[in-house]
Every structure is written in C-alpha cells, then in structure tokens.
Amino acid sequence: MTAPRPEPPAEDGGDHACWLPRVCPECGLLADQDPPVMCTGCGAQIPDDDPRPGRAVTP
Ligand SMILES: [Zn+2]
C-alpha cells in the first residue's frame, strides 16, 4: 500500500517578472510602482519596456 505523498509547493520564479521591470537601470533601486516611473533614488526614468523576446509590439 502506497500512501499518497503530498507534492511540495514548486518554487517557481514567476513573481520575479513582476518586479524586474521596476529595477532602476541607473542605480538598481526597486521602484514602488510599475514603470514607466521616475526613480526615487537617482531620478532616472525607468522605461516601461519588456526585455523578454517574442512580444510583438507591432500595431
Ligand atoms: Zn535610480
């Protein structure tokens, strides 16, 4: 008899994609808002771009 073993919660890094775009390219500070936003640390503009390939931006 085999007891059903509960699956441990998978550690997926999906949440990382949520805050990665918020990281300031100039100083590395994490913005508290979604881009585009101005960095509160150095005042640089954090652009609202998606570095992941495959996302077509053509109209
Ligand atoms: Zn900054």
Image: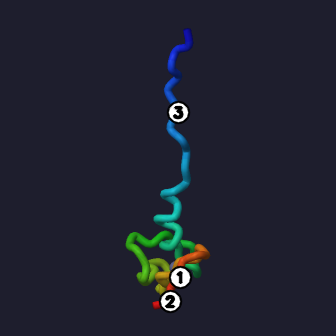
Question: Which residue is nearer to you in this view: 16 or 28?
Answer: 16
Mark 1 and mark 3: span between their CA atoms?
A: 36 Å
- Residue at x-position 48% and y-position 86%: 45
Above-or-below relation of 56 to 14: below
Q: Amino acid at mark 1?
A: Ala
Q: Which of disc 3 and disc 1 is earlier in sequence?
A: 3
Whole-percent x and y of residue 52? 59, 73
Q: Position of residue 56 (x, y in %)?
A: 53, 82
The answer to the question of whether label 2 and label 1 lie on touching residues, with beta carbons closer than 8 A, is: yes
**Residue type at the position of mark 2:** Thr
Which SS class for mark 3?
loop
- Report whether 40 appears left or right of 54: left
* Residue at the outermost bottom position: 59
**Quadrant of res 53:** bottom right
- Secondary structure at numbered mark 2: loop
Q: Is residue 12 above or below residue 32?
A: above
Residue 50 spot, x, y in % from top left: 53, 77
Residue at horizontal 52 percent and vertical 31 percent from the top = 7
Disc 3 target residue: 8
Indicate the secondary structure of the residue bearing disc 1. loop
Crowding near the residue tagged with mark 1, few <14, some 14–19, many ≥20 C-alpha atoms within 10 Å: few
Frontmost of labels 1 and 3 is 1
Say few, some or many: other residues with alpha carbon within 10 Å of mark 2 (under 14 / 14 to 19 / 20 or more). Answer: few
Q: Is mark 2 within 8 Å of ligand 1?
A: no
Q: Specify the color scheme.
A: rainbow
Report which quarter residue 38 is drawn in: bottom left
Residue 49: % across, % down: 51, 81
Q: Tag 3: Cα neighbours inside 10 Å, few (<14), some, or many (≥20)?
A: few
Which residue is the site of mark 2? 58
Mark 1–mark 3 CB contact (< 8 Å): no
